[in-house]
Amino acid sequence: MSRMHEVFSEGVVDELRLETGYNPRQRRATAYRLLLCCVEACLFGKTLGFAAIQAFFVKRFGSIQRRAFQLRFKSAAAVRFFRAALDRVIGHAVTEFAPELTNALATFTDVIAYDGTGQRAPLRGRKQGLRGCTEDAAGSKWVVGYSLRSGVAIEAKAGAATDAEYPMWNELVGKELRRNVLYLLDLGYFARAIFDNAVQQGAHVLMRLKADETTRNRLRIVSAIEHGQACTPRRGKTVSSYLLRVNRKKLSEIDLDVNWGLGSTATSLRVVGVRVNKRWFLYLTTVPRSQMTPETLASTYRLRWLIEFLFREWKQEADWGRSATADRDALEALTYAALITHALVRSLRVAAACRHELPLETLRPLACLHAVRAYASEIVSALGSPNSAAWHDLAEELIITIVALAYERQPSRSRPRIARKLGAGGG
């Protein structure tokens, strides 16, 4: 955990400040002090509100005028600074020591689920582009990437509440998909370009197949696996017509090689399906047959719901779903600060699992948050200390506390753990 102290050191923070052009006046409310007080406030669950964060600043660093404090967040430079700080925390203090995936997911470097969530904002935020879904509402939308290897939200992109998620995801991830990483996406991201990029970059994508006939008819079947044998259907060259035929055969699963597109520009993909209570659940993926069976792919897609549980935790424990500020830059800067705090808590969870050689999934995330929250003031004091020994000693105590309070010796039988079975430690 020494890397975490380095990331929060005054020298590194000053480096980020210069790179992003943030807070050039450097008076009482310096970038370093603002980062620390934001982390402390977010640890206490006081997120996206100036009054609470300013109170923590006053307690630690002395009085400051309200307007002067708020203006430190109301700029594009503030957004760049807090986002750069998040990238530094993720890159240097989280992903490097996260445990490897195991079991069915062992062949992937990571599994990342993406989804969007909303925040309500005061109505005057509409003037700054925070358009709500109705005329009498304002808000923002965040597309978040959640690593199931480390259990940390590793990246996020903000927009207005009415913005579509797919263009936001393109800005966040773009064509640079990570090699050998499995991306779990819902139907809001259904586009051929994502699959094309995945094939080119050596990445993998798994998402539900749209139910409309037009989409299914674009996929031309090349071959199929029936009763363990490969065959080429003489009839039913589209997914829709093939389903009508297999329903008469009463198959419980299908596994198809398909082409999306025509001629040399076609993309070779795979459609798998499992039948549950006379209903087909179909998935489109780049994962080859040698890596995963249809049943395993269907179970893997269910891991996407873990990001919904993360959003619920944020909104219930940190009041992440609503903002007290209508300023767009301030809302984004404070949200990135909350994501930094999330990464700090989850990195302590990873450190506890590694130190005690425990499976990461046996440490309950919410219990870890409650354990760390009790040490909020001590954590910020240790991170702000020029002596790394203070942070090292506190981190050791936190690891012991996390294991004592969050370790789940035996999972509840009424709550099956798909992540544990598949080998996604961060789930």
Image (spheres, rainbow, N blue to C red):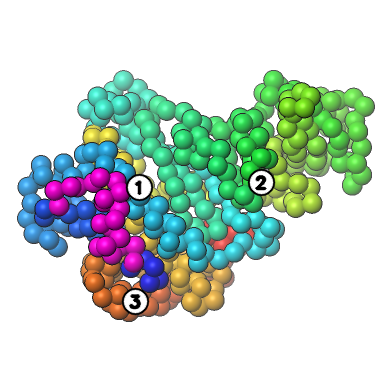
Q: Secondary structure at mark 1?
A: helix
Mark 2 burial class by Cα count in 10 Å: few <14, some 14-19, many 20+: some
Residue located at (78% from left, 33% from top)? 258
Residue located at (34% from left, 53% from top)? 85
Q: Quadrant of residue 324?
A: top left
Q: Which residues are magenta?
A: 6-26
Mark 1 burial class by Cα count in 10 Å: few <14, some 14-19, many 20+: many
Task: Provide residue 360's location: percent of width, then percent of height.
Answer: 53, 67
Residue 271 inside the magenta-drawn segment: no
Q: Quadrant of residue 184?
A: top right
Which callout, 2 or 3, points at the residue further toward the start of the chain? Answer: 2
Q: Kindly report which numbered mark, 2 or 3, lies closer to the viewer in this rendering.
A: 2
Question: Can you identify the residue that label 3 sits on?
Answer: 392
Question: Where 266 sits versus 333, above or below?
Answer: above
The quadrant of the image that shows the C terminus is: bottom right
Disc 1 marks which amino acid?
Answer: Arg
* Residue 274 or residue 379, whichever sits in front: 379
